[in-house]
Image (cartoon, rainbow, N blue to C red):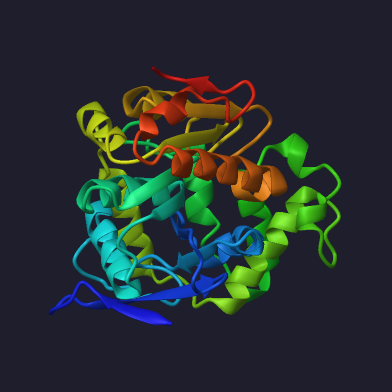
Amino acid sequence: MHARVAVGIAAIDLYYEMIGPQHAERRVLMIMGFTSTGTQWLQTAKQLAELGYQCCIFDNRGVGESSQPTKPLYTTKMMAQDTLQLLQHLGWNENIYVIACSMGGFIAQELILKAPANTFTGVVLTSTAFGPPLSIPPLKTLLQLVSHKKGSESSAHVRAQVTASIMVPDAWANEPVAPHLAGEGAVTNRDGIAKLLEYEAKTKPAQTRAGYRGQFNAIVWHHCPPRRLRKLGERSCFLVLAGAEDRILRPINAAIIGKHLKCQYHIYPNRGHALHLEMGPEFIKVVTDHFDACANNAKDFRSVRDSAIIPGSSSVN
């Protein structure tokens, strides 16, 4: 399905899918990151749907089946406006939960600041950042991310393997495939994630040069400084997650964001950038436990930061 957003001369279409019971009490918006489509949320959304959640996954401006306009250059504020209009199209005005990964976390920051107060009940930010220089991947990773976009269709398997290797730690990648990633031909965890990336590549239109440049511009210029983060922290109930072995966005971001949001954060040892894929059922439990705590403290979400949702997690008071 498509929603027309950014109405007017610069109007675009956003592709989205709904997964889960239509009249679910809890609705989850899932925002994906740089160059990635909503397909990468599919497994997570299906698991949440089995627990009674209705999930909306979508392709951001500049990727997949959504419009990939050449102009104007994208910003995270623009992409947040797209997302807000998608919510309006769905008729989702309140009691919304959010899971946002990487650049999706950038968009979520702007979205929650832009939306009316009390729109969002609970938010999980994973593997994200708040602004330069910590929002820019290390040079080595950046070069790998750029180079893996090149190549023929016949090299899709190789590109998927390279991308999977960037996303997750080597030690975990080389372990026998976890049950939640198991599939035909998947021997290791790297294979399992690569298969998901290959499926995405086969089922979605290729990202155009304009889409890539637009999204790259958005991540480079995103800036949500401490002053804005503190304001953001007043608008919902947050949990921030990161992997200690993240090679794309430095995990110290989680501690800084958590400090200014005054919320719990947790940095997982031996985990990388794709926590929702690496952790599988454990990720679902962490997310739903947080959402339960947020729902139970909807009138005083600050109290959630003091609850022991994750053993060994850090909270900032």
Q: Residue at 47% of width from left, 66% of height from top?
A: 56
> Where does residue 25 sit, x and y in percent of width and height?
48, 61
Question: Where the C terminus falls, by quadrant?
Answer: top left
Q: Residue at 26% of width from left, 29% of height from top?
A: 230
Q: Residue at 46% of width from left, 72% of height from top?
A: 64
Can residue 213 be seen from the camera position used here? yes
Tell me: 299 left or right of 204: left
- Decide which of 218, 309 is in the foreground and name it: 309
Residue 193 in which image quadrant:
bottom right
Q: How many marks?
A: 0
Q: Residue furthest top?
A: 317
> Where does residue 100 sit, x and y in percent of width and height?
45, 50
> Where does residue 162 sit, x and y in percent of width and height?
65, 52
- Decide which of 64, 52 is in the foreground and name it: 52
Q: Residue furthest bottom?
A: 1
Residue 229 in which image quadrant:
top left
- Decide which of 285, 274 is in the foreground and name it: 285
Question: Where the N terminus falls, by quadrant?
Answer: bottom left
Tell me: 219 left or right of 206: left
Residue 311 in which image quadrant:
top right
Tell me: 3 left or right of 154: left
Tell me: 133 left or right of 10: right
Can residue 165 be seen from the camera position used here? no
> Where does residue 297 sit, x and y in percent of width and height?
42, 37
